[in-house]
Amino acid sequence: MPHAEDTSNEIGVPVVRDWSLGVVIVDDALLSRRASGSLEHWLIRSLVACAILMGIIGCENKSEEPSAAKPVSASSKSGLLRLTPEESSRMALEVVPVARGQFLAQREFPATVQSNENELAEVTTLIRGRVVKVHVDVGQDVKKGTLLAMLHSMDLGVAEGDYLKAEARLHEAELAHARAKDLYENKAVSLAELQRREAAMKTARAEARETKNRLELLGVPREEIERLNREHTIKADVPLRAPFDGRVIMRNITRGEVVETHQKFFTVADLSDVWVVGNVPEKDVQYVRKEQKVDVILAAYPHAILSGTITYIGDVLDRATRTMRLRVTVPNPDRLLKPEMFAIIRVYAASSPDALSVPLAAVQDGPIGKMVFVQRGAGEFEARTVELGNEQGDMVRVLEGVSAGEQVVTKGSFVLKSEMERHKIEPTP
């Protein structure tokens, strides 16, 4: 047997000591030879057994003393994590108190970008014609009065001819009435003749007015009518012009085609501000009001937050979706917002004035939910499960789990979480 020796104890009992195992083994064969009497043999064996048992108990007590003296660094039952001053200094932990005050509730609604319909125009024609030339294309910025396209219309030529004829007849009727008036004053014609000439003049004047009104209804500008009166020549050209400063966002016209009055040729929009139209669920109607400032987030620019104003709130809910229409006007000086883009309308509403909040950096994912580390003393931290509410910037509302003024760890909370998992500490519910 390794590390063993055959010796005899003080009473002459042969034993074998195994120092590697820390036990004493009695050599029963030697004991039988040295103890002749059965009673003496039994007494000796009992004494040796008692001595061995006492030695084992003593060894066990000695082995437990160092573990009892070892410092406790974690307690899984209490959810506490204890750090030495050196560990705390190495982790560079930062703590902040749980704040109490007014917290803004946040609601988000899906929406789409649309053109401002108050600054949107569909360019059409009031007269049938053929396209002679198209001067602009989609995406082009135009000023008010810019020529978009030119049509040639036979119907316009006929209307202008009728106007010139009516003006000629009116001129003739006015001359005839003036001659009749002079003759009547000289007793050359009767009163009835004067009245007949006066009636003819009024009829010609009504016809001229009617043809002029027809030209105006066909969209002929006043300058063109003055040119007709001055030059007495027919020009059957119909110009299509921009109604205001804006951008051409739609074109549906080609050179040479014959167009009708019901067609839409161009859409001109002023995109300096746009509408963001969303749908608000019935349960969130209480959070919106007219002229309220809101944030708009675009799917195309997820990191940009634009400011807008609620300019319209629907009066009737959609029966199928149980949502209310909401319209937000957003300035668009850089033309970043384009019609039909997807967006989110974010509305903030004030919550209770005594809401509790902590920084988002203090919140970690725990085994049963979100948790924070609350400082209980110097180097002592409690992992505590919390129930969170809405977020506002880098702060989050805490509904349950902490009290106002308690110190929570922000910087270094992830390191504490790692230590908690290493020591298998369960957070306090």
Image (cartoon, rainbow, N blue to C red):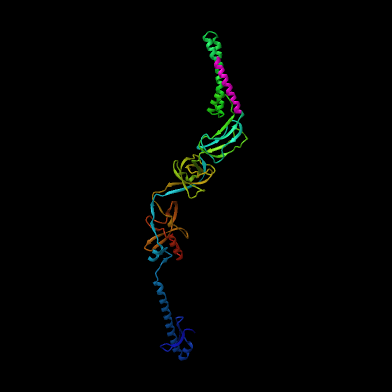
**Left or right: 318 in relation to 105:** right
Q: Main secondary structure of the magenta part?
A: helix
Residue 239, image quadrant: top right
Query: Is 91 inside the magenta-drawn segment?
Result: no
- For this rendering, which residue is in front, 186 or 265? 186
Establish if 366 lies above or below 205.
Answer: below
**Left or right: 215 in relation to 287:** right
- For this rendering, which residue is in front, 107 or 23? 107
Q: Look at 44% across and 60% down and name the residue there.
A: 414
Q: Position of residue 40 (x, y in %)?
A: 44, 89
Looking at this view, name the residue that lies furthest to the top.
187
Residue 153, image quadrant: top right
Q: Position of residue 27 (x, y in %)?
A: 47, 87
Residue 84 appearing in the image: no
**Residues rendered magenta in the picture:** 155-176
- For this rendering, which residue is in front, 67 or 410? 410
